[in-house]
């Protein structure tokens, strides 16, 4: 795995996301990396991330982890398709156009979660990513994401 997370390559104007933004003090600070040809992120839920059944993770957290990992994976894949490193200009930032989540089984809250992404297709402004979230080696949720490139004009002006 590379040492610098995809999200750490975002310029400050694009680093405020609740799920993965380094500039959001209250956020999850999810960090995604290449692991061979797939992408991976890890997150350890806290007791306050509980769902309706004690001992299991809240489904909204699962969806947000898939969302942020998928968008970061899309940006990394787009850079890779262009033959360049993340963080080089022009900066690429992707947002979710569509996210379908299938919850396969309850996700235990008592350990690290692993989120994986497989890049399905890279087009000039759109990337498709298949996602999974596992706990204790068992896949608990799957996602299908279509991410679109955010135009530079969308950057928040400081």
Image (spheres, rainbow, N blue to C red):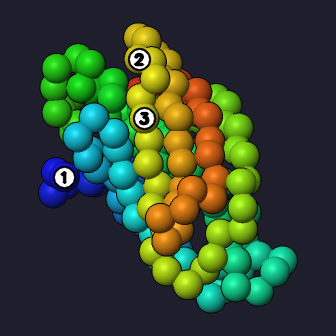
- Could you say which quadrant of the image residue 56 lies in? bottom right
Q: Are marks 1 and 2 in contact (CB under 8 Å)?
A: no
Image-based side of 154 in relation to 5, left or right: right
Q: Nearer the viewer, mark 1 or mark 2?
A: 1
Of 81 and 144, nearer the camera is 144
Q: Which residue is mark 3?
A: 118
Label at residue 122 = 2
Task: Say above or below: 82 vs 26.
Answer: above
Q: Secondary structure at mark 3?
A: strand
Q: Which residue is mark 1?
A: 1
Q: Are marks 3 and 1 in contact (CB under 8 Å)?
A: no
Q: Which numbered disc flags the more N-terminal residue, 1 or 2?
A: 1
**Residue density around tag 3, few if under 14, some if 14–19, many if 20 or more, within 10 Å:** some
Instruction: Determine the residue positioned at 26% across, 26% down.
Output: 79
Where residue 65 appears, x then y in whole percent?
A: 55, 57
Q: Secondary structure at mark 1?
A: loop
Instruction: Determine the residue positioned at 61% across, 80% down.
Output: 109
Q: Which numbered disc flags the more N-terminal residue, 3 or 1?
A: 1
In three-dimensional space, the C-alpha distance between marks 2 and 3, rounded to whole angstroms, equals 11 Å
Q: Are marks 2 and 3 in contact (CB under 8 Å)?
A: no
In three-dimensional space, the C-alpha distance between marks 1 and 2, rounded to whole angstroms, equals 21 Å
């Amino acid at each position: 795995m590379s040492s610098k997370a995809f999200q750490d390559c975002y310029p400050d104007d694009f680093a405020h996301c609740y799920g993965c933004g380094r500039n959001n003090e209250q956020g999850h600070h999810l960090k995604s990396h290449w692991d061979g040809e797939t992408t991976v992120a890890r997150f350890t839920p806290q007791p306050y991330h509980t769902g309706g059944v004690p001992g299991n993770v809240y489904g909204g957290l699962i969806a947000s982890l898939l969302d942020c990992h998928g968008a970061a994976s899309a940006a990394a894949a787009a850079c890779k398709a262009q033959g360049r490193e993340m963080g080089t200009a022009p900066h690429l930032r992707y947002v979710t156009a569509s996210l379908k989540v299938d919850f396969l089984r309850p996700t235990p809250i008592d350990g690290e979660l692993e989120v994986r992404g497989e890049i399905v297709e890279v087009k000039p402004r759109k990337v498709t990513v298949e996602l999974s979230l596992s706990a204790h080696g068992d896949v608990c949720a799957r996602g299908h994401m279509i991410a679109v490139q955010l135009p530079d004009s969308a950057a928040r002006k400081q």
